[in-house]
Amino acid sequence: MSLGAKLPAATRPAAASARPLGSLLVWGLGYLVVGVALATASAWEVYRTPLLAVVAAVGAALGIGVVLLVRALRWSNWMIPILAAVGYLLLVVPVAIPSALGTPVSVVRGVRDGVVGIVVGWKQLLTLSLPLGAYQAVLVPFFVLIVVGTTLAAFLIVRDGRGSATAAGIVVAMACFGIVFGASDTGAAAAVGDFRLPAVREVLLGVLVVVASVVWLVGRARLRRAAALRLAQATSSSVRQFAETFALRLRRWIAAVLLVAVALGAGVAIAPIAQGLVPRQALRDAVDPLLILRQQPSPLSAYRSSFTDVGLNSELFSISGATGVDRIRLATLDAYTGDAFEVGVGRGGVRFVRLPGGTPAAGPAVTIQIGEGYHGIWLPVPGGVTSAPSFTGPRAEALSGAFYLDAASGSAIDVATAGTGYGLVAGDRYTVDAGASAAPADFASEKGAQASVSADDYPQLAAWVEHQSVTRDGAGLAELISRLRDRGYLSHSLTDAAGSAAWIATLGSTGSYTFLSSPSGHSASRIEGLFADLNVQEQRAGSDANGGSLVAAVGDDEQFSVAVALIARYLGFNSRVVLGVRTVADPADPGIPFCTEVCTGADLSAWVEVGSPTGGWTAFDVTPQHDISPITITDGEKLPENPTVPDQPASDPLDPPQAQRDDSNAASTEQPPVPGWWDVVVPVLRVVGISALALLLLVLPALVLAVAKVVRRRSLREAAQPEVSMVGAWSELVAGYLDAGLGLPIRGSRAAIAEAVGRPRALELATAVDRAVFAEHPPERDASRTSWDLVDDERRDLSAGMPLHRRILAAIAPASLLRDLGASRELVLRFVPSLRKVGRP
């Protein structure tokens, strides 16, 4: 008997009541539980907290339990979302926001966060650094996903309607949560010989989700078929069920496994190529902290404002509990535009994200209170911060919710609203755990990599560095920094007029200080001018001149920090400029300001951190000396103590032009080796292979559909019992009509469908199959062969009446396969629009 045959009216209530609560329901709910487990495994890298499993279990129990309860009590389906919403409100705080458990007020706030998190929770996920843990309400989006996903999927499974197969799409969507909200860097790769499979964890989870979905759909179809046959036998004594042979069942499962294996194998094969062509990008890569950081000027440009008469003694902030902390950093600047040192923001640059609690660092807890002389988004913090600060005061909640950290550089910002601007204001107070002081690295032996600053862009800098004749390693860089500071002269302003007298008086109180004008700014032209002064002074003084006669560069930390950072990049090291204060005096360098409790504008300084190719950063102070002022030397002047020798032209260190031409000519005369035939063929084969693989992936869905139809036709034709084979012939004929786009009822008796089609062979086959099914004696094998001959002849006639492109489309049309999976009428109509002209029988 056909599964689509119309039952007698008297049996319809029995059929409805016979909808199984047994094996089919258990099979579907078991698949849903497996899907929730895979979704939890996918989201593990996002959270990494055992509470994630509790959230998944409770959410799944709530969603499935509500659906089963409504069904058992025979309530209206509208009660499902109502009960799910009530259960969510009752469970969201203890399950997803356990930190809100405490006072009744905090519980009410937790419920509010749970409701608000339904809409804006994704933003919190994307602006926090991974892993999230159980920080604040970050588990709310996953709890919502599980509750809503399991409720919808369980409703479709329990309802067991035509669209219940779409529950697989919901399970797949839940499993994609970890990919969508995870990091752009995938998991570890695996290498088998020359083949490299990236993101093994993600690929394995994807394979498991696909396999689980296919197994559920196949098992569900077989269980429904078995239930339909049992129901038909219960309503008609003439219907008999014959067991499939083991060989037929084995062939069907082998074909299904091969189809899945081909699809998965192609995906695994293309994964390394796809990763090489297009780098993975996650949603969190496009999220910035309100874009406020981009609107801020470089904090290094405002460095000199701290040395005016007003800013010099203004309190920036006060520090307590900083024992063992030697520096407090404000901003770390790593991107030089040629005009200013700024903060690189976005993929590949400095990345500010919210810090979800984190793990307290091993260093002391430092308490900082902002003074009247400081405001802005930059948060003073010690190095090695790994957990969010604990804010106190009336603005504590706003500051806590707007705190961002760049873990790579150690800089922190706070974009809380403050009047007409953003950031910190006087009176803000917080406590933050500092990292343990790192042991000094052996930077002297480090070697630089490829230079990121060229002599063409900075000729004066390159000429000064090359004239020093130092090694291109960490020791050589340290020597260059020392010489630059010794030959520099400290000055914070262009004039000594009103507004700049305070810092001049402060330097004069420590010794004899002579004011010299110093332009502000740290553009490329300003830095090149600084090195030009050094080069001219060294040329005039001679190579044997003492240190005092080589002093020529006038400026302060603003210029010298940039100069040192560019020198480091010229030698092949990574570098960045840090603005902050020192909290410990350096006996070997008494010229560096420091503060112990109250830090004012006079204590502000900038230093440079140089990255080692082997990892880690080494700090170098850059403040120039102020004890020896520059000496003006005219051309040809002979210094009294150290006679000079005639200066050599700046081009002397270069190779003679003729030698350069000879080298160039010699290089040009060398003939490149003639490539062998294999060297020519391999690139062509690689391009052809990749193109063929890409083409195969494009046509793979069509091939899978075509192969699935061939397997289906063969299994129906080779059924062990002639009666089953004849029913299969009718089913295959209807499938051919559907894929060809003929208008016919999707459901109905064989006679009704044949009459709607109006083709002679359909009427003949429908009559033969009905006679075979309802006859007292089963048909012979010749009858089944005749039935399939009718099907073959009808398919040939259909193909002959269609153009080539229509025949190809019919071969890969998914309409008949969707019908076999129990898809809804509307879903099938999307692929066969002409069926809309045919009413239900």
Image (cartoon, rainbow, N blue to C red):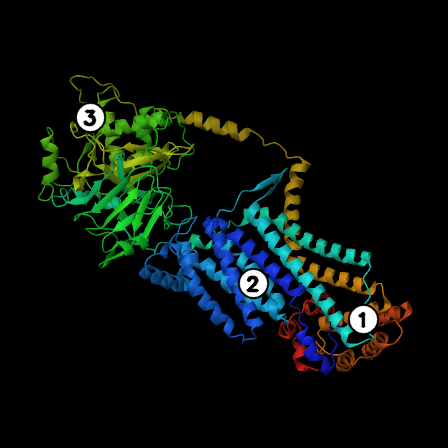
Tag nearer the camera, 3 or 2: 2
Q: Is residue 254 left or right of residue 635?
A: right
Query: What amino acid type is highlighted by mark number 1?
Result: Val
Mark 2 Cα-neighbour bin, 10 Å: few <14, some 14–19, many ≥20: some
Q: Earlier in the sequence, mark 3 or mark 2?
A: 2
Query: How far apart are the two marked residues, 2 and 1, measured between alpha carbons?
Result: 34 Å
Q: Which mark is residue 635?
A: 3
Q: Which mark is residue 727?
A: 1
Question: In front here: 231 or 562?
Answer: 231
Query: Can residue 252 be seen in the rendering of this structure?
Result: yes
Circles 3 and 2, Cβ within 8 Å, touching? The answer is no
Q: Earlier in the sequence, mark 2 or mark 1?
A: 2
Question: In front here: 529 or 804?
Answer: 804
Query: How far apart are the two marked residues, 3 and 2, measured between alpha carbons?
Result: 83 Å
Residue at figure coordinates x 60%, y 55% from the top left: 209
Label 3 element class: loop
Q: Which mark is residue 170?
A: 2
Mark 3 Cα-neighbour bin, 10 Å: few <14, some 14–19, many ≥20: few
Mark 1 Cα-neighbour bin, 10 Å: few <14, some 14–19, many ≥20: many
